[in-house]
Each structure stands twice: as C-alpha cells, then as structure tokens.
Amino acid sequence: MAKAKLLLLFSIYFLLLLLLLLGADARPPFACVGPTSSLPFCRTSLPIRARVRDLIGRLATSEKIRLLVNNAAAVPRLGIGGYEWWSEALHGVSNTGPGVHFGGPFPGATGFPQVISTAASFNATLWELIGRVVSDEARAMYNGGQAGLTYWSPNVNIFRDPRWGRGQETPGEDPSVAGKYAASYVRGLQQPYGGKSGYLRLKVAACCKHYTAYDLDNWKGIDRFHFNAKVSKQDLEDTFDVPFKSCVVEGKVASVMCSYNQVNGVPTCADPNLLRNTIRGEWGLNGYIVSDCDSVGVFYNTQHYTSTPEDAAAVAIKAGDRRHCSNKNQKMLNITTQHTFGPLVPGLDLDCGPFLAQYTQGALNQGKVNLADINNALANTLTVQMRLGMYDGDSSKQPFGSLGPRDVCTPAHKELALEAARQGIVLLKNAGRALPLSPARHRNVAVVGPNSDVTTTMIGNYAGVPCGYTSPLQGIGRYVGTNHQAGCTDVACSGTRQPIDAAVAAAARSDATVVIMGLDQSVEAEMVDRVGLLLPGRQQELVTKVAAASRGPTILVLMSGGPIDVSFAEHNPKIAAILWAGYPGQAGGMAIADVIFGAFNPGGKLPVTWYPQSFVDKVSMADMGMRSDPSRGYPGRSYRFYRGPVVYPYGHGLSYTKFSHSIAQAPAQLSVQLDGKRAASLNSTTWLNRAVRVTHTRCDGLTVPLHVDVTNEGDLDGAHTVMVYSVPPEGHLAPVRQLVAFEKVHVAAGGQARVVFGIDVCKDLSFADKYGIRRIPIGDHSLQVGDLSHSLSLRAATVLI
Ligand SMILES: *[C@@H]1O[C@H](CO)[C@@H](O)[C@H](O)[C@H]1NC(C)=O
Ligand SMILES: *[C@@H]1O[C@H](CO)[C@@H](O)[C@H](O)[C@H]1NC(C)=O
Ligand SMILES: *[C@@H]1O[C@H](CO)[C@@H](O)[C@H](O)[C@H]1NC(C)=O
C-alpha cells in the first residue's frame, strides 16, 4: 500500500516535471509579474496613458536611451525584459528581422505568395484574411518565445519603375489599390479589440513602410542610401502619399517607417514636414515612427546631412526644429502632470540600429535634445507595447495567449496559401483556348525551364521558412506524367553550356509543353534593380526553340515580381498561352497546375503596367516624375499618366470564361456644393472647367452610386474583378484615368451578379494641383467599366447657405 502510494507520488512528481519542461519553450513573461506587478504601470485598470506616464517617470535617463533602439535593453530593477522590435511578416512570418527564430516547436510558418501576386487577386477580403492568419501564427510564435509582436510590414511604396528590385514586395503601381491593400492587410494583422478609442488593443502591431518616395535600390551606380528623390508636391500628394495615408487613417496602423533616401534634399527620417506635419499632424498616427535599419546612421555617415552624430540624433528625435512645425490638427496625448513632457509630437521614436543608443546622451549633454523629446518618443513606443498587452503580466492568460505550435501551418492556413496563389495567377494570353489542358488528352507533359522545379524562388524575399513546398514539377505531376528538363541551369541562363537541346527533345516527344521561366532574387531583390525588362540570358532562345519543337501546345509560365517584356511570346503563334504566376508562395506549383488543368479558372489581373524594353531605354530610373512631360520627351509613369505602347496594360487578365458588363444605374449629373462664401462670388457657368479645392466644397460623404451587372457568358464558373476608372475633364494635370473602385465577384456560368459601388467624390474624383492641393475638376467626367463609358457631369452648386 505504502509502496503504491510512493509510486503514485513519484509519478505525479514526474508528470509535473515533464509539464515544466514542456512549458520551458514558452516565453518568459516580458514584464509585470512578481514583485513589480503592483506598480501603477502594470495595473490594467488604469488608462494606458497613465501607465505610460508612470513607467516613464520611473526610468533613468540612461535606461530611456537604451529603449530608443530596436534591441531595447531590459530594465531588470523594474522587472522589464529586453525586447527586439524588429520582426517581419510581409507575406507570412519571416525571419528577415532578428525578432523571429524558426526551429524547435516552430520549424516553419505558412508562406503566402509574394505581395505583388496577392495584389493581382484584386480581392480585399483575401488580403485581410491573410493578415489574420499571419498574425495568428505570429502570436503563436510570440507565445513560444520565437517572435516579436511588432512587425515591420507591409511595404506600400508605389511600384513606380518596372526595374525596382523590391517592387515584388508591394501591391503595385496604383496608389488607391496600394492604399486599400495597406488598410486591409493591416486590419487583418492588428485585429484591434477591446480598449478605448485611441487605445484599442492590438493582436500584433503592423508598420507601413518606407515613407516616402522610396522605390529605387541600386541602379547604375545610384543607391538608396545616397539617393535624393526629387518629388513634386503634386506627385507626393496624389501618388506617393496615398497608400500611407490610407494605412494610417483607414488601417489605423500602429507604426510608420521612414526611408533611407532623401526627398527634395532632406532625409525622410529627419524631415519635420513629413513626420510631424503629415504623418502625425494631418493623418493623426496613433503609434510610433521607426527608422529603416539604420537610416539615422546613414544620413550622418553616408549623406553627411549633419556635421556631428549628436546633431543627427537630435534632428531625428526632434525631426527638425519644432518652431517650424504647424500641427493644427494634432491630436495630442495630454500628459501635463509632469512638466518634463512636451506636447506629444516627436519626430522619430525608434531607431532600427545602434545610432540613437550611442549618440543621444551626447546630444542631451550638448543641449541638442531635451528629456521631454525623449519622453515623447518613449510615450509612443511604450503605448504600442501596452496596447499589445506586454505590461499585462502573464501573456498565456491574455487574448491570443493560447495560440501555440498547433496553430501554425494548419491545414486551413496551408489551404489559404494555395487559394491565394490560385487567385493571384494572371492569364495573359490564351490563343484558341489552348488552356486548360486536359489530363486525358495531354498525358505526357514536358516540364521545362529554370523555374520549373524551384522552391525558394516561389516565396520571393522577406519570406520565412514555409510549412513545405509544392514545386511546379510536383504540381503538374499530380495531374499527368512529366518529362522534366531544366533547359537552363539557372535564371541567368548564360554561356554556351546550357542544356537547351535536351529540353527541345523532351518537348518533341510530349503531348504538351509547359515552360516555366522568369526571374528570381539573383535578378531582382533588395539592393538589386534590373537594367532591362527582357528575359535574362538565353531564356528567350530556350522558349522559342522548345515551342518550335513541341508536339502539342506550349504554355509559358512566368515567375517574377516585376514585369517582363515577353512581346516575342505574345506574337509567337507556337506559344499558345502565357501565365504570370508572380512569386506564388509555398503552394505555388500546385496552383499553377490547378490553373493549367482547369481545376481553377484564373481571375487575376496585372497590378503593374508591363512596359516594353524601349521604355527603360528611354527613362532614367532616378526620374521620379509620375506625370508625362512632352517638352522633354518624358512619357510619364503608370497607367495613370503613361500613354505609350505596352506589352500588357495595367489590369490585364483573361479568364477561361467570358464576362460582360452593363451599367444598371448611375447618375448623369451630380452637384458638388461649394462652401457659402466661394459659391456666392461665382455662378455655375463661371465654375465650369475649373477645379475647386476639396476643402472649399462639401464633398464629405458625397458618393456617386454606380450599379454594374456582370454576366458570365461562357460555360465555366469564374471570378471577375469589376474595375471602375474615372476619366476627368480635359485640361487639367490630373491622371489620364484613375482606378476609383474595384470589386471581385464570383459568377456562375450563364449567371449574372450586380455590383454596387459608391464612388467617393472628395477622394476619387480629385487630383493634386502643382502645389499639392487637392481639387475636384468641374465638368464632364466619365466612368469606365470594361468597354463601357458613362458620362457624369459634375457641377458646382450655387445654392447658398
Ligand atoms: C490637459 O489636461 C489638463 C489636466 O487634466 C487640462 O487642464 C488641460 O486643459 C488639458 N490640455 C489639453 C490641451 O487638452
Ligand atoms: C454667371 O456669371 C457670368 C459672369 O459674371 C455672367 O456673364 C452670366 O450671365 C452669369 N450666369 C448666370 C446664369 O447667372
Ligand atoms: C476572395 O477571397 C476569399 C478568400 O480566399 C474567397 O473566399 C472569395 O471567394 C474570393 N472572392 C472571389 C470573388 O473570388
């Protein structure tokens, strides 16, 4: 009996030990457990600002300074752990930053398609859903001590030039689509809950980067660390700023990152106009501003913007001289009980890199910054940490506290990665309805090309370790027998020793040929811009020879972030179909096969203009101008301003079925009411052909109702994105046309669906004048949907007061 009891006790002891050991990979609590947990900054019943104030009041200056950098030091005497702010989750939890570690119970995370591919789905529901899944996995990894809670994603710079190596990370060239992507993905990641208005709790904190006009990495000797982007006020307002504004105002992002480059001679991370007046003042950022890694060091060491490092530290923290700032709309966090706090309008709050930890004390000693500036910066970062629950004690007892290894790479998450890849594939050409192939008729398929059996190529940059891969060869192999020949040893495909002949032989003896070509990170990446748009090396030769020899149809599949000039393939009748798969993520090969064999009807559309090579021969990558300038032979950029020849236009994308549109309802005219005084001075005739300032109208909440019917005229179900463009009246420096709304709908074969849009007059029908002031042109606008054009007469109402 006693022996049995002892045994029982012993096994209970063992069980407890085992539990303890199993629990050992959970994160040690960050703060507010043990003796310090009764301090006011740990009290969840107090308002966050009071907790932040309390905590800042307890910190010594040297401790504060060590919190201004990404690897924030622990403050052991207050029970606060060290924290690595730099984690990334561009399209899945990524180990690009030091905050994320794969291994142990978290060997990988779901690897979604690169953002440019996901953008091509034009499905905002999908964008938000991916964000939610990524933040589930991020929280799970945080709980396990292998990731942070602050993610420096998404990248919402405009894909301005087709050569940009990081264009793949972005949602493309259209500012409002990028803005919608930013707001959707950020909402998905942050999933705000509970709390009071400004202090909503966050699942994780996202960051929109890189503010602003950053879209050149390294091109013909010009690099991002030295580049001074010369940007007009006009382009800044209606192109470069648009996605960031949407991210802050609509997405309510918790952070913005400033960039390495200068804008008009001032490093963005030292520009009070950008950081204070725009991001905080106009847009009301509720969060922190972080440098790129380490852009403060870069503007001192590389750009020699200040004469001493202390000046650089001061200029960043203060973002210039406070006296020159106007913060009329500033939403201040009112911290007045301690007079060491200024109004909460610092410049940079956090430095990714060591610079501020090294030089802030010196700047303080020299009187270049004061404690209030530092307190303000900390108030912004600490508030975000509080909103993340980091000072609420044991994180396992908090919302999302139960997420763990079993919530990562779940079947549902992997299925979403596959679904996203399918939705992002764009059918560029399908002559004679060559696609889909039939597994019954095409039993043996030659699978050719340097990207035909790739894995890491499919996830692009800023990726993590995926749950697993399906390469194109594997995906196609699930449908049919394959004859695999790479044809090129790598994407560079240069030199005489390329195995092209073997690929030609494989094509000659197969029922169909799929050639999977394109680019990878050796050709386009961070710090690697392209110089040309053609397929690298002998890739075109391989495609042409294989197509000529192929017994059956040849299908060209392109993997790339940026556009490729494949005019040769578009015009070659031997190449029946062309698909662009972007970088389709961990399940990309399966998605490609599902499209090729008709298990999925493609509905993706190009998020960038596919220019011909002649465009880049003519245009310097360093020329930031969006608008065309015929006087100097400058063609302008993006579908909004460029009217020259294209390989494929923005928004191009075919389906296996045929969709048609009809406009069911839309007004023929609309009045915009002017504010009383201005309307009184002029009548409606004299307002015609003018453009009124948005701030002088009452356009707030004014929308143009537009009802569009979509009919699926074919015999296959499919999804279709209805894209609505507006064309302003002639005679303004407004875009030639501008996407003002889009919506994706699923329509069964033979069926019809109605899409109802409300086009925002202030936002969508306005453009910036040369002073960067938004105006609405009065006169005849037209709304375009597919081939349809609807005329809308916009009038200035003179009805007074
Ligand atoms: C800030 O709070 C103090 C004390 O609560 C109050 O007297 C003051 O008017 C407030 N200031 C602003 C700008 O809201
Ligand atoms: C509008 O004003 C113009 C110029 O002041 C004038 O010639 C015209 O008759 C006015 N039209 C109406 C409808 O009042
Ligand atoms: C948009 O994406 C979501 C998530 O994958 C999907 O459920 C939905 O069907 C998509 N919409 C259309 C019209 O394809």
Image (cartoon, rainbow, N blue to C red):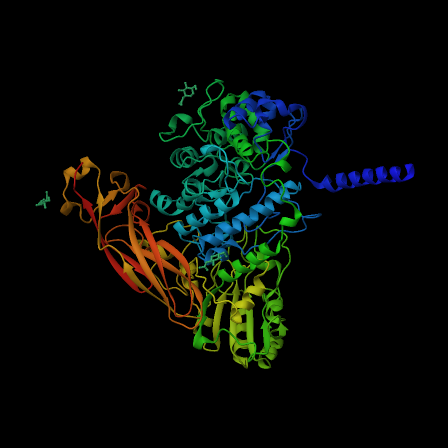
> Considering the image in quadrants, where does the N terminus appear?
top right
Residue 16 found in image quarter = top right
Q: Residue sitting at 49 percent across and 25 percent down?
A: 373
Q: Using the image as rendered, state which of residue 407 and residue 212 is in the foreground.
A: 407
Residue 272 found in image quarter = top left
Q: Using the image as rendered, state which of residue 79 and residue 402 is in the foreground.
A: 402
Q: Would you say 436 lies left or right of 647 here?
A: right
Q: How many marks?
A: 0
- Residue 695 seen in the current view: yes
Q: Horizontal and vertical percent for residue 345?
A: 44, 29
Q: Residue sitting at 81 percent across and 39 percent down?
A: 12
Q: Using the image as rendered, state which of residue 270 and residue 703 is in the foreground.
A: 703
Name the outermost residue toward the front.
1
Q: Horizontal and vertical percent for residue 78?
A: 64, 24
Vertical relation: 253 (above or below) 407? above
Q: Horizontal and vertical percent for residue 214?
A: 46, 46
> Considering the image in quadrants, where does the C terminus appear?
top left
Q: Horizontal and vertical percent for residue 438?
A: 53, 76
Vertical relation: 643 (above or below) 549? above
Q: Residue sitting at 14 percent across and 43 percent down?
A: 683
Q: Using the image as rendered, state which of residue 609 and residue 244 is in the foreground.
A: 244
- Residue 99 seen in the current view: no
